[in-house]
Image (tube, grey):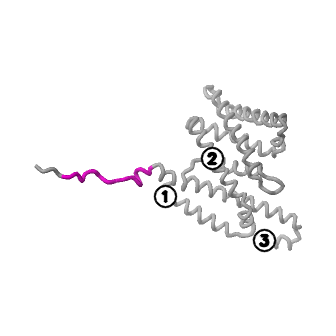
Amino acid sequence: MDIIWNLLIQRGIPATEVALYKEVFVILILLPVVTTIIGIARYVIGIKSLGIFTPVIITFLLYEFGNNAGEQDIWKAVKYGVLLYTITLITSWLVYRVLKYLRMNYIPKLTLVTLGVVISLFACIVVAGIVGFNGPVFLNKFTLIILAILVEPFVSAFARKGTSYGFNTAIDTFITALFCYIFISITRLQSFVETNLLIIPILIIVNVYLGRFTGLRLNEYWRFRSILFGDNKTTNDQPKQDN
């Protein structure tokens, strides 16, 4: 990658703008890194998530929440992420429960759920300001909009599989996204991505392997441990009795 950055400088692009090119490249290449981790979580570990879009969005929302003058504050990201994600999830479920038995088309119903989430998020920000914790109001407004849009996968999960599945999968999704966020926040990883195109063939090889993976997931080893690792001795070797 140094060849590309040097070429840009030779073309007369200021060093400050080249730094922006580097930042854009790192963010873009981190996207397939995140989706690769999600693939590993799904096919190797066996962690379910709300599709691929939702954990990716949550990962980069955490990345935005944790941004502190160009550095990542993981505690800040977790603090805001857990709070706002929980509010969005619970409000989505409560409003959906109210509207569940009404005969309504999907998009108007989803709009009402989104309205409930928006009101809850704004109320949270106002209450935080009243008690002297006004940090949430300074969050990027666009990220809050993206957070509110997450009501669709939540409502879809509740409608298709029920409350228990929806909450369990939403929690697994957040855990996966949190791990992805912590991983991509590693400074050495970002430096490696910025300076080394080797990340591209690594991603290709890993995903080709995942695409052909047919083995048991780790949680399946645990689930079927009594069958896989149990005592399979039969009790047929009984001593014969004399006639």
The residue that mark 1 highlights is: 214
Q: Position of residue 190 (x, y in %)?
A: 73, 63
Upstream in sequence: badge 3 or badge 1: 3
Residue 173: mark? 2
Query: Distance from label 3 to label 2 (Cα)?
Result: 36 Å
| Front one among 186 and 95 | 186
The residue that mark 3 highlights is: 4
Residue 77 colored in magenta in the image:
no
Tell me the residue at 55%/54% (across/down): 45
- Left or right, 172 with respect to 138, comes to left
Magenta segment, which residues? Answer: 224-239
Q: Residues within 10 Å of mark 1 (few under 14, many from 20)?
A: few
- Left or right, 201 with respect to 222, comes to right
| Front one among 135 and 47 | 135
* Image quadrant assignment for residue 1: bottom right
Amino acid, disc 2: Thr
* Image quadrant assignment for residue 120: top right
Tell me the residue at 77%/55% (across/down): 72
Tell me the residue at 62%/42% (across/down): 170
Secondary structure at badge 1 equals loop
Upstream in sequence: badge 2 or badge 1: 2
Q: Main secondary structure of the magenta part?
A: loop
* Image quadrant assignment for residue 23: bottom right
Q: Position of residue 28 (x, y in %)?
A: 73, 59
Amino acid, disc 1: Thr
Would you say the residues marked 3 and 2 are in contact, meaning their CB atoms lie under 8 Å apart? no
Query: Distance from label 3 to label 1 (Cα)?
Result: 39 Å
Q: Position of residue 71 (x, y in %)?
A: 80, 57
